[in-house]
Amino acid sequence: MAAPHVLALPFPAQGHVIPLMQLSHRLVENGIEVTFVNTELNHALVLDAMPADGTGRSLDGIHLVGVPDGLADGDDRKDLGKLVDGFSRHMPGYLEELVGRTEASGGTKISWLIADEAMGWAFEVAMKLGIRAAAFWPGSAAFLATILRIPQMIQDGIIDEKGWPNRQETFQFAPGMPPLHTSQLPWNNSGLPEGQPAIFQLLTRNNEARDLAEVIVCNSFRDAEPEAFKLYPDVMPIGPLFADRQFHKPVGQFLPEDTGCLEWLDAQADRSVVYVAFGSFTVFNPRQFEELALGLELAGRPFLWVVRPDFTAAGLSKAWLDEFRDRVGGRGMIVSWCPQQQVLAHRAVACFVSHCGWNSTMEGVRNAVPFLCWPYFTDQFQNESYICNVWRTGLAVAPGPDGVVTKEELSGKVERVLGDDGIRERVSALRDAACRSIAEGGSSRDNFKKFVELLKLKD
């Protein structure tokens, strides 16, 4: 009997590709064939970022393919409004063509589509082609609840029909869920204001298309978000996801990882290093970048800092950064990208200065690392609220009146996080709950088994 063949389709962003690739590895381990569909640009990035001795276009049962996203070569893919508009109009046709080519070539018939919940149009394509569909949600259940409750929020007068807040207030969907201010709604914090209508339209369309999926699985675990899962009991938590315990399997990184930082960490004392990383989208202006650098210097602790090539807006002097590197010497290491899961699992890491993307949040939770939260956009403010207000496993930076987080604020908050015994106890307890959830008999483990059984079930 042929193995089930799954088409995996992430939203075209690094934070969405990684968890779906992790899930894909786990499915392959359970006898399921996976074709992983990136946009052509992201497909090329993934291939280029693989080690030179990589296995090419197939990763132990995962076949990597690319389809156009509908944008021109020079278009900015970090403009989420433009990206969403482009792929929503053009990718359905390209996905249909891919399915047709795959089956015409004599390959195994595609039996399931597992698509990011943010790619709701793909469920419509699956229904048209007679393919069963499952939705994958890479974020928190609370974030999903926020999107699913858009009609109720409009009815309650919290937002208008275009998604803009009617009033400034903090609200909760249920006790125990993260409080959220109306100024921090994810669709209003997704880049340029002119792109917001396309994003909000996508979310509302996704709410309708989601009903075409037979099941929705989520990269979270029940003990982290019990109230959110009570609100939506049909959402199956299967996280925290990871590809393999040895961190050997590629997970779709867009940038090559600098593994030299692991050797540097090996030379540091236990729980001494401040790890600083802001994901794949965050951009700082030169002044904020300098304050961050000076804050790390002022803290006087070893630090590992991820500075992407596009992390700063134009205007930062290379000479200034070179001088900073010379001043901090061996006490600080700056890399362009790193194997984050291995870093967070390292005994030397003391805390995580983070944008609070959900992948980073789950990776920190799984390794009992305290957070210093510095959110940038979309769901990161809600994740910060979980960390600071619900789990109480970290603190948040406070920008000044001019919107800049000063070096004194950063260094002072680092010391507070590291000196808080209560935070250390709570991160350990949450780590233990995460480990129980994915161990034999745990709720996430059981849900994953049910999901695999569903994928293998014949029509």
Image (cartoon, rainbow, N blue to C red):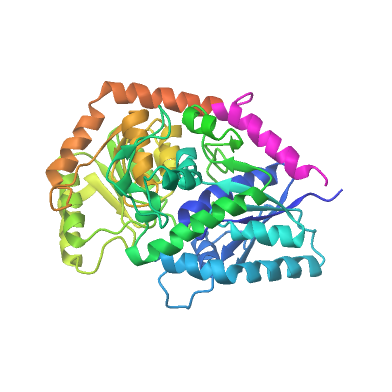
Is 284 situated above or below 248? below
Relative depth, front residue between 346 and 146: 146
Relative depth, front residue between 65 and 357: 357
Q: Position of residue 232 (x, y in %)?
A: 55, 35
Q: Residue at x 16, y 36 (%)?
A: 412
Residue 129 appears in view: yes
Q: Is residue 440 magenta?
A: yes
Q: Main secondary structure of the magenta part?
A: helix
Position of 447 with respect to 303 (left or right) is: right
Position of 89 with respect to 78 (left or right) is: right
Q: Residue at x 50, y 70 (%)?
A: 86
Q: Residue at x 70, y 71 (%)?
A: 97
Q: Position of residue 409 (x, y in %)?
A: 15, 41
Q: Is residue 451 magenta?
A: yes
Is 341 situated above or below 272? below
- What range is drawn magenta here? 437-459
Outermost residue, right side? 1
Q: Position of residue 379 (x, y in %)?
A: 40, 47
How many circles with numbers are drawn on the protein?
0
Relative depth, front residue between 385 and 155: 155
Position of 141 with respect to 108 (left or right) is: left
